[in-house]
């Protein structure tokens, strides 16, 4: 552990000397220097990266949400490009030990590649997630 701490300290001091210009990482060690640090140049900050054109921003034209103290919730929104989403949830068998289950029901719609509106209806409970839609395959019953 002491060796790791010593190595970190030496690397930090060496980097500070390079950044202050006292030691060049590219220059050979001078007679008065004990070591030549092999420290790569600092990495650029991610926020300083060159950014391309701004993506198309799709405005939300309608939005609503409600959260109850009993764990119920519901929300919905619609975007300017035709996407609609609605969902609600509640606690099933509240207060019944080993039988409580969170239930979520909802749907979302979006324009397909051909312009036709595609809708998915779903629910999730203690039996899992179940989705259906006219464009989704239907599982084969065994």
Image (tube, rainbow, N blue to C red):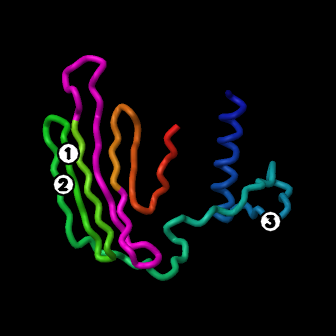
Q: Do the residues labelled 2 and 3 touch (CB within 8 Å)?
A: no
Whole-number angstrom distance, CA of label 1 to CA of label 2? 8 Å
* Earlier-in-chain disc, 3 versus 1: 3
Whole-number angstrom distance, CA of label 3 to CA of label 1? 62 Å
Q: In the rendered view of the protein, which quadrant contains the N terminus? A: top right
Q: In this view, does 142 lie to the left or right of 97?
A: right
What range of the chain is rendered magenta?
91-120
Q: Is residue 50 left or right of residue 75?
A: right
- Residue depicted at x 22% and y 38%: 90
Q: Nearer the viewer, residue 21 or 25?
A: 25
- Quarter residue 97 falls in: top left
Q: Mark 1 points at which residue?
A: 73
**Label 2 Cα neighbours within 10 Å, binned few <14 / some 14-19 / many ≥20:** few
- Residue depicted at x 66% and y 49%: 13
Residue 133 in magenta? no
- Quarter residue 94 falls in: top left
Secondary structure, mark 1, is strand
Q: Are marks 3 and 1 in contact (CB under 8 Å)?
A: no
Secondary structure, mark 2, is strand
Which is in the foreground here, disc 3 or disc 1?
A: 1
Residue 107: % across, % down: 31, 56
* Earlier-in-chain disc, 1 versus 2: 2
Which is in the foreground here, disc 2 or disc 3?
A: 2
Q: Residue 65's mark?
A: 2
**Label 1 Cα neighbours within 10 Å, binned few <14 / some 14-19 / many ≥20:** some
- Residue depicted at x 38% and y 73%: 111
Q: Residue 26's mark?
A: 3
Residue 48: % across, % down: 52, 71
Q: Are marks 1 and 2 in contact (CB under 8 Å)?
A: yes
Whether residue 119 is situated above or below residue 14 in the rendered picture: below
Q: In this view, does 25 lie to the left or right of 1?
A: right
């Amino acid at each position: 552990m002491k060796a790791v701490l010593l190595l970190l300290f030496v690397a930090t001091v060496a980097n500070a000397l390079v950044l202050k210009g006292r030691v060049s990482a590219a220059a050979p060690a001078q007679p008065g220097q004990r070591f030549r640090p092999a420290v790569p140049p600092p990495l650029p900050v991610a926020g300083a990266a060159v950014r391309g054109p701004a993506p198309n921003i799709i405005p939300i034209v309608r939005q609503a949400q409600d959260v109850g103290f009993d764990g119920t919730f519901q929300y919905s929104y619609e975007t300017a490009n035709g996407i609609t989403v609605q969902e609600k949830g509640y606690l099933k068998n509240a207060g019944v030990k080993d039988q409580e289950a969170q239930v979520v029901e909802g749907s979302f719609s979006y324009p397909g590649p051909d312009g036709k509106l595609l809708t998915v209806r779903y629910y999730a409970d203690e039996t899992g997630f179940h989705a259906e839609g006219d464009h989704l395959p239907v599982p084969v019953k065994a």
